[in-house]
Image: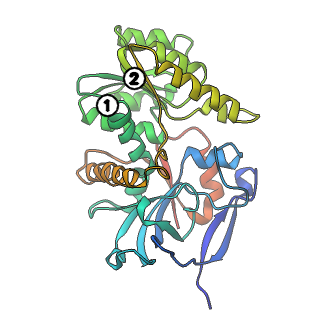
Amino acid sequence: MNETTTHVVLPGIVEPAGLLVEETPVATPGPGELLVTVEATGISYAERAMRRGRYFMQPAFPFTPGYDLVGTVTAVGPGVDPAMTGRRVASLTKTGAWTGRAVVAERDSVVVPDGVTSEDAEAVTVNGVTAWQMLHRAARVRPGQTILVFGANGGVGGVLIQLARHHGVRVIGAASPRHHEAMRRDGVDPVDYAAPDLADQVRALAPAGVDAVFDNIGGATTRTARSLLARGGVLVSYAIIDAVSGTGSLWPPFLSHVGRIAFWNTLPGQRAVFYDLWSGHSRTPKRFRAHLEEDLGRVLQLVRDGVVTPRIAARFPLTEIVRAMELAESRTLDGKVVLLP
């Protein structure tokens, strides 16, 4: 009899209660693939958007969500070093990680060092590589500079703050007031992201402007963010929550946003970048792989060394995905909801 595994199915645009838990046969890894027994996966903003059909290029319904996972390799496909069997890996999947056993691409997987728990590694996989690449590759922030981070209490923002502080960078964090005290304890200067006088709050802290802004909101917030840059500063936009949270087609606001970023980047005095984690995945796969291995590897080493503390807000068995999703969408958390198959 074929082995089966538990997985979560998103059948369509449903409320969290509409998520299904089913059994499916365990797949066989193909060329360049690994079969992984999943030890931890999690809920990110991407899955919350997918539930509403509001994530760019998401698969057709029904499908299994799950942007990343951590687990142990139990079998390898043709062309993969057999020595990978038994190793723990952190894998980027975009979808398919909410399961007990998953087939993943070896080139999208990085070995997790000893001394890092699977839960901690999961909390910094997609969030950690995104934060590292935006800080060090997109913005190229230097020690002694000042940055403004929107979504400072979120999954990416929480790692970005820690990486920046470790790099000797001053951080101004934009988030809801309920998160401000925790941010102060982390050495961050908090501002209210929704306040009408947001720009004035930031200018009071950085009269000459900030050296980089990391914006995940879009719309009017992005325009305000750019106005707060110092000369030579860089705006890094990596999401448009404003549009994703709305209704109607995502393409007009997305194309308008990316076009505006591209235009700003032609003007002298500042840079503007739209960061996409998957950029180059198909066009320059060797470069994508090299950067993933190097950047996620560094983040995992910082976790092992106690420099970066993964922020886990709650842990749930995978079979309790409904309760987990409801909590993740409550907007009350500081950290990631981790799922344990």
* Amino acid type of the residue that numbered disc 2 sits on in the rendered structure: Val
Q: Residue 295 carries which label?
A: none
- Return the x and y of residue 25 as percentages of the image width and height: 62, 79
Give the answer, above or below, for where 97 lies relative to 290. below
Viewer-proximal residue among 271 and 27: 271
Could you tell me if the residues under marks 2 and 1 are in contact, i.e. CB atoms within 8 Å?
yes
Viewer-proximal residue among 335 and 60: 60
Graded by Cα atoms within 10 Å as few (under 14), some (14 to 19) or many (20 or more), the crowding at tag 1 reads few
Q: Residue 140 carries which label?
A: 1
Q: In this view, does 173 lie to the left or right of 100?
A: left
* Residue positioned 41% across, 59% down in the render: 119
Element marked by disc 1: loop
* Residue positioned 34% across, 37% down in the render: 137
**N-terminal-most mark, 2 or 1:** 1
CA separation, marks 2 and 1? Answer: 9 Å
Viewer-proximal residue among 336 and 271: 271
